[in-house]
Structures are given as C-alpha cells and as structure tokens.
Image (cartoon, rainbow, N blue to C red):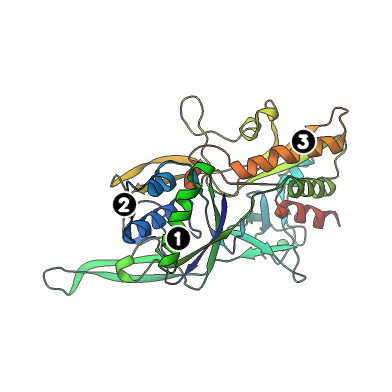
Amino acid sequence: MIVRSTIDALAPLAISLRRAVGFDLGTRLYIPGTALRGALAQAYLEEGGRPDDPAFQQVFVSEKVRFLDHRLNGAEHWPASVMCCADHGDSHRLVDLLLLAGRNASLAAAQCPDCRAKLGRVQGFWQWAGDQGANPIAILRVETRRVAHSAIDPRTLATAREQFFSSGVICPGQQFAGSIRSESAAEAGLQEVLEKIRKRDGHIHLGRGRTRGQGLARFTASQGSGSSEEELKDRLQRMNKSMRCDGSIVFTVTLQSATLLYDEWLLARDLEAADLSPEFAGCQPAARFASTQVIAGWHAAAGLPKSEVTVLSPGSCYLFRLALDGREPEAELDRLARLLAEVENQGVGERLSEGFGEVIICSDAHTALWAAEGR
Ligand SMILES: [Zn+2]
C-alpha cells in the first residue's frame, strides 16, 4: 500500500540536524521520514494506543513500513552536479556537469555560459520555472526565520542570566509532501494508525520546542501510487533523446534522501550499479557527483542517541551508460524501465523504513537542462 501524505506546518517547525547541543541551533529544510515516524507514533500513543498493540508493532517496530522524507510541495533536491553562475545565480543559464562528464568534456574549464564567471553549487530544491527566466527549472526556497528565547531560572521564575538561545525554524503556512509505503503484512496496522490520526484532525508534533508553541502540524493521507514501467520508459526515452547517444542507453540516479550503504567492514561506501539490481553487476557509473554527511538522531524508545553514521547526501547523482552490444534498443528500454521502476519503488541501501535510500531515476531536472542546452 502506498499512501500519499502531506504535512502542513501550523506553527514554526524546528527539525534538529543532530542532537540539540549549544545555544544556536539550525533546522533541516525538509521533514525526515524518521521524524514523521516518531511524530505519528507519539500521536498514536496520545490517542490511547499502546506500544504492544499489533498495529503499533506492525507500523513502527517491524520495519515493514517506509516513511519517506517530506519535502516542500513534494519537490526534488537539486542534483549535486547542477551548478549556477557564482555572480548572477540562477538568472544566468545553469550547467549540469553530469552532462559534460557524460560527453567526456573537460570539467575544469566549465564556466557560466552567459558571463564566464566561476560556477557554484545550487542548493535546496527545484521547481519548474514556467516561461520566465533563463532556465527551465528554478530554485524553490523554503521560508525560514530565526527565533530566540531565554531560559527561565526555576528559583526566581525570572530570566536566567547568560542563557539566551536562538534557533532556525521553518515558517508556518508551508506544505510538505511525500509518501508512506507499507508491505502488505503491515497494511491493516497502518490503516488503524491513520484512522487514529484522522480522528484528531491530523494534528501531530514535529521537532523541537513543543512547550514554546513550535512543532504543530496537520498530517493528511490519501491513496498514492508507485512508479510505473510506462513512466520510467518515458523518462528514459526523453533523457536519451537529450543526451543523443548512439549504441548505448544512459540513465541517471539522483538520491532524494540520505542513503546508507555499507562495505564488508560495515563502513559507509559509494553507490554501485549492483546496488540497483544484480543485473547491473559490473557496470560502472560513467560519472558521479556525490558527497557525504554525518547524521545522528535520538532513539525515543531507548532514550539514547542513535550512533552517528556517514551517509551519501541527498542530491548525489550518478550517470550510468549501458552499451547495447547489438541488442534491440526498444527491448532494452523495456527491460531497464522494469528494473528501474522497481528501484524507485523499493529504495536503495539500508534503514529504508526511516526514509533512507529514496532515489529518482532519470530526474526531469537533468533532462530539462540537457534539452535546454541542446537548443
Ligand atoms: Zn553568469
């Protein structure tokens, strides 16, 4: 079962980057799947549910339900390969280094096509630009602000000296969208949990500062659908048209959430083709733009910090090229569409139930920029 879900911020949201320590804290600009899972579990318990209910066990403990990250308006992360003019931002044409790398062009000489300035990373999320502007896609900004408060001295009930805190928060009035995916064995439990949440008007609490009025959000769920082979084939065809390659088929993988892959020593490693499907074993990425980050978390049930892990950052992207070797292109596209739809639906790597390992194959961000470049 796939549930399409939305989270409306009714109050400022402060989602910790790591365990809250220090006087100045930041916020994530999206709702991690693990934060949503915690908020729904808490709401379920507040409605009289118990941790040993079969529904609670199925949904929150069995790892049969994947809670994916929820992003502003359901947008995608910018691929790490997309660069913008260092002087004029996205008012000048964007450059996708993955395309240059795929054509074996030199990346060292890459510069702004409009003014030859240096290039810088584009951060955050993208949206369609409409007819305006220099690019088919544009930056989608999450509205944030900073809030501050001082600690209260419990003896005097007055402001405590030298205890002033500030924090970045996501402004209310914005909607975050994503999905929850359940194996059939946990469907009944998920229905029951969603029914309990619906009864309280979808009210959940996310992130820090509940006692200061932060974190209130409305959760809604409706029926969703997974990626289909037809959709994947269409994306593959459009991408290969933009890339204009003969004798091979290209596809890209762009991570949409933190992705955790272990090597034989249980250390973090980079994505390989075999992680997508055993049928791709031996195939190397033609180009990759990946970065890592360290994430931590708080295990509410155990009351302990989760161990820190190194993950591939959202936005990391990979270009794969498969030689046709005389095979029929149409049949090969069908085979790839079938395999890659499965990859999108299942995710890649470890700890999938916490929202890790969400990928987009042949993202429209790449295809749109490649098509624009070819004009
Ligand atoms: Zn420029």
Give the SS element for disc 2: loop
Total residue callouts: 3
Position in image of residue 30 (x %, y %):
51, 59
Image quarter for ligand 1 equals: bottom right
In the depicted view, which residue is nearer to us: 119 or 22? Answer: 22
Q: Which mark, residue 312?
A: none
Residue type at mark 2?
Arg
Callout 1 amino acid = Glu
* Pointer 1 or 2: first along the chain: 2
* Precedes in sequence: disc 1 or disc 3: 1
Residue lying at 50% horizontally and 24% vertically, measured from the top left: 264
Give the CA distance from mark 1 to mark 2.
15 Å
Residue 172 shows in the view: yes
**Disc 3 target residue:** 335
- Residue 50 image label: 2
Residue, disc 1 = 195
Q: Is residue 270 above or below residue 111?
A: above
